[in-house]
């Protein structure tokens, strides 16, 4: 599902925000200028993740496909990307895509995050499996005069996770003049529990 949240001053994403769900050259259009300095939030949620409840999140990668261009003057913008925790809203670090990174007129794909980057979000398996988990996009004016446009064609989110593998480990220890003692501990992914 695509949700557009109003952020002041109101500057709606053009085209149709639903276009961001399919790579089909139909785009959600965000425009900013020296007089209208930011867009509304474009929040994309409900990616359909269903990861095991015992899993832990190792990393999150957000891939965007689109173009960007200065429409008039020499205006520039920055696209800000955040993760959305269904229970607490925006979480973790904000990542940015600078003006002219996508290029124009051909779509370019840019990925943020990785298999080991959690965006400092502390998201759990339940969080990313929720329909409220998603990505928040926000375009802000950064320099110049005139109009700058970011046209997003597609978004993809990849969640990397691990499952604890329990490994019993038996230890024997001795104390002078005492019988041998055995201790069994459980270790998962290098941690002792």
Image: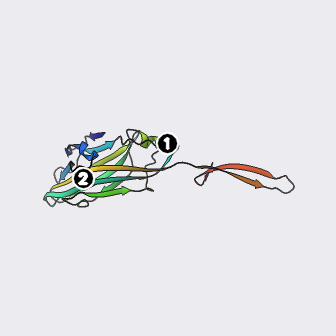
Q: Nearer the viewer, residue 163 or 38?
A: 163
Residue extending farthest front = 24
Q: Is residue 164 above or below residue 87?
A: below
Location of residue 98 in the rendering, given as x and y in whole percent from the top left corner:
27, 59
Describe the element under mark 1 as helix, strand or loop.
Answer: loop
Seen in the image, is 147 located left or right of residue 121?
Answer: left
**Quadrant in the picture for the N terminus:** top left
Query: Closer to the observer: label 2 or label 1?
Result: 1
The way the protein has been coloured in the rendering is rainbow
Measuring from the top left, give residue 186's x and y in whole percent: 65, 49
Residue 74 figure quarter: bottom left
Q: Mark 2 sits on what residue? A: 140
Q: Helix or strand or loop: what does disc 2 sit on?
A: strand
Q: Residue at x 46, y 48 (%)?
A: 122
Mark number displayed over residue 52:
1
- Front residue of 146/156: it is 156
């Amino acid at each position: 599902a695509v949700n557009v949240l109003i952020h002041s001053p109101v500057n709606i994403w053009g085209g149709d925000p639903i276009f961001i769900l399919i790579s089909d050259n139909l785009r959600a259009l965000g425009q900013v200028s020296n007089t209208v300095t930011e867009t509304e939030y474009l929040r994309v949620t409900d990616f359909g993740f269903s990861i095991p409840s015992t899993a832990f999140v190792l990393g999150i990668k957000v891939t965007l496909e689109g173009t960007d261009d200065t429409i008039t003057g020499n205006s520039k913008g920055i696209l800000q990307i955040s993760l959305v925790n269904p229970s607490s809203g925006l979480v973790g670090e904000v990542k940015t895509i600078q003006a002219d990174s996508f290029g124009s007129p051909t779509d370019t794909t840019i990925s943020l995050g990785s298999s080991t980057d959690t965006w400092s979000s502390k998201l759990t398996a339940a969080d990313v499996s929720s329909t409220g988990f998603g990505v928040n996009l926000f375009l802000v004016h950064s320099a110049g005069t005139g109009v700058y446009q970011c046209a997003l064609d597609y978004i993809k989110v990849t969640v990397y996770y691990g499952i604890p593998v329990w490994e019993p480990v038996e230890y024997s220890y001795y104390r002078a003049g005492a019988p041998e003692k055995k201790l069994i501990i459980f270790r998962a992914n290098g941690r002792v529990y």
